[in-house]
Image (tube, rainbow, N blue to C red):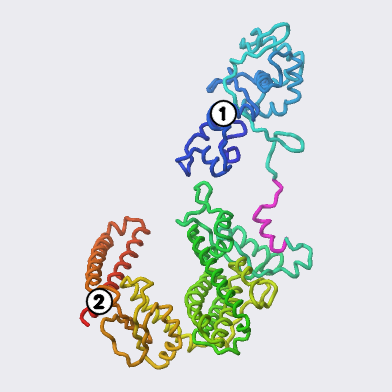
Amino acid sequence: MYGDTRIGQIFSFDEVKNYLYSPNFNQPDKTNLEFYEKFVFNREIPELKDEESLKNFLNSAFTKVPVMNPDGIEDREKIGFVPHAVFYLYINGLIGKTFDENDVYEAYQKHKDKIRFIYDIVLNGIRKEEILEDREKLKKWLFDHAYGNCKNGRIFFTEMQEKFSIIEDHIREIRYFIDLACENCGSYHLHQEEDVLDTWFSSALWPFGTLGWPEDTKDLQKFYPTSLLVTGFDIIFFWVARMIMMGMHFMKEKPFGDVYIHALVRDEKGEKMSKTKGNVIDPLDMVEKYGADSLRFTLAALAAQGRDIRLSEKRIEGYKHFANKIWNASKFVLTNFENNRSKVFKDLSALKLAFDDKWILTRLQETIKSAEKAINEYRYNDYANMLYDFFWHEYCDWYLEFSKERIYKGSDEEKAAALSTLIYVLDKSMKLLHPVMPFITEEIWQKFPYKDADYLPVAPYPQVRGELIFEKEKQLIEDLKEMIVSIRNVRADFGLPPSKKLNVYIKPSDTEFEEVLRQMEPSIKLLAKIEKLEIGTDLERPANTVVAVSRRAESYIDIAGSIDVEKELQRQEKLLQEVQRSISISEKKLSNENFVKKAPEHVVEKERQLYAELQEKAEKIKRIIESLKEVKTS
């Protein structure tokens, strides 16, 4: 409280009480005491829980300062320094209940620096201190104020056999003193040092001052200028600009080549994290709960240039699932390697690579090139997100699934190509992911059959290999993926369960794509959940089928035996009516000028997004209805 200037060095009970038990500014549902307990000290403070406990704590922990003058009294009526000093000695136990002039004199001599300092503030100056410095004068003064033999006739003490006792009724208030003094001499007269180097000025010397300047050291010659400064936007002027000015003045050269201004980490609502708001995400808690790699990857993935990071625990949890995906995919690959160790080759050029092998190798080269560009341009979010998409959505979702048929059922030659490609791409992926997920990638990489370094941080970073780029095969597999997705979409549109296998007839647009389909037929049946598959450029559309159109093929999916077409048609028409009603409600809101102008911006934007989603959903339902009508009439 004193550090926050809520109270002074000399303070009253009421000042502390009123602050501790009043509502907190940021969290009015809590008192300031409750706020300190929860967010500052992380424990209850029983010494302050009520007024009685608080008073006992103050009386035991601080120097008591008796005040004998009521508020508003005229200066000529005020009780002066000497009575206050004697009462101070008594109330702080420095003299007994009965005392004489010697007791007061000796106690005052031991503590006079503190007493003078306190009452110089409380009384706005002290007078007649000489009485306390002379035993005879002090004795006379005590007698005078025991019998009223003074100008104002005040009686502060009782006297018996030259021993005096305090009349406590004269104490109007007890204040408290925070005992701050010089560590060396004990003086209470403290003032701020004036001969100092300004914080930002000294920081401006950092690029060369830390390297031995003004001496021309080897470190200074080697490390100045440096390549990159990482900082926050809020100190560009305070620090960055000053470092450049000082570097140009003293070293005649700029101190660094690039400045990376990192994002400010905010909460999920975009508000600055603060203990007072209770919205702080403790990184140590997140590491304990989700792992260091998940937190590190989250921060990298969200660190878009020019934008603050909106961090939420859900995002961190999401990237923990990514870490699990990496681990499980690597376990699958390495387990199959152990079962087929003799069939894995480091040199891919000696293998007969399939269409999907060439596709994933090409995508790897493209990812390496894009990742290197992102790193060089400090676009860490792009770096993290492109690796996420490549590893999860291409390597795991597609290539691992493509390769399973060859690993489990293929010839030795096919197994060798699939497993060798899997290991090769996994190796490069671990190296690419290592800067943003160092722990899990190192753990996995140490289990590899062959390594080009002892540890990942010193392993060669992946380089683009032109001989592993196959543009033609890449495009063929992209077209195949599009076709499989179109079949999956039909399944989802008609609510068919994943366990239900379908009969599908595929009509490729050319013989080149037909060759890919025939070579990849087992994988197509696996990925699209197909029971019976027919492929041919001269196929006619069978009855009771729905068409899924893709760039290089038309797929005819037999749904007649899987659903009741009439019931499904009725369901979709009813669903269309509901969506159209929702569209009408949303249109009315967005056409209302009062709503658009007066509603919060995020509410209006959310409504616009909803409207767009409803329009898209309505169009999709219309297409499904048309397909069902075609099946019904065929």
Q: Which residue shows up at 30% across the image and 82% down it?
A: 547
- Taking depth in this image into account, of 483 and 209 the one nearest to the observer is 483
Crowdedness near tag 1: few (<14), some (14–19) or many (≥20) residues, C-alpha within 10 Å: few
Q: Is residue 198 left or right of residue 433?
A: right
* Residue projecting furthest to the left: 633
Q: Which residue shows up at 69% across the image and 45% down it?
A: 194
Q: Secondary structure at mark 2?
A: helix
Q: Is residue 22 above or below residue 597?
A: above
Residue 101, given in percent of the width and then of the height, sits at: 74, 14
Crowdedness near tag 2: few (<14), some (14–19) or many (≥20) residues, C-alpha within 10 Å: many
Q: Is residue 379 left or right of residue 504?
A: right
Give whichever of discs 1 and 2 has the lower sequence position: 1
Say which mark, if any, is on residue 378: none
Q: Which residue shows up at 34% across the image and 65% down it?
A: 609
Q: Is residue 228 visible?
A: yes
Residue kind at label 1, given as amino acid type: Ser
Q: Is residue 570 above or below residue 87?
A: below
* Residue projecting furthest to the top: 161
Q: Is residue 30 magenta?
A: no
Say which mark, if any, is on residue 53: 1
Residue 205, given in percent of the width and then of the height, sits at: 69, 60
Residue 26, given in percent of the width and then of the height, sits at: 48, 44
- Taking depth in this image into account, of 372 and 478 the one nearest to the observer is 478
Q: Secondary structure at mark 1?
A: helix
State the CA–CA distance, disc 1 to disc 2: 79 Å
Q: Which residue is mark 2?
A: 628
Q: Which residues are magenta?
A: 194-209
Which quadrant of the figure contains the N terminus?
top right
Q: Is residue 200 magenta?
A: yes
Residue 422, given in percent of the width and then of the height, sits at: 56, 79
Q: Is residue 365 above or below residue 126?
A: below
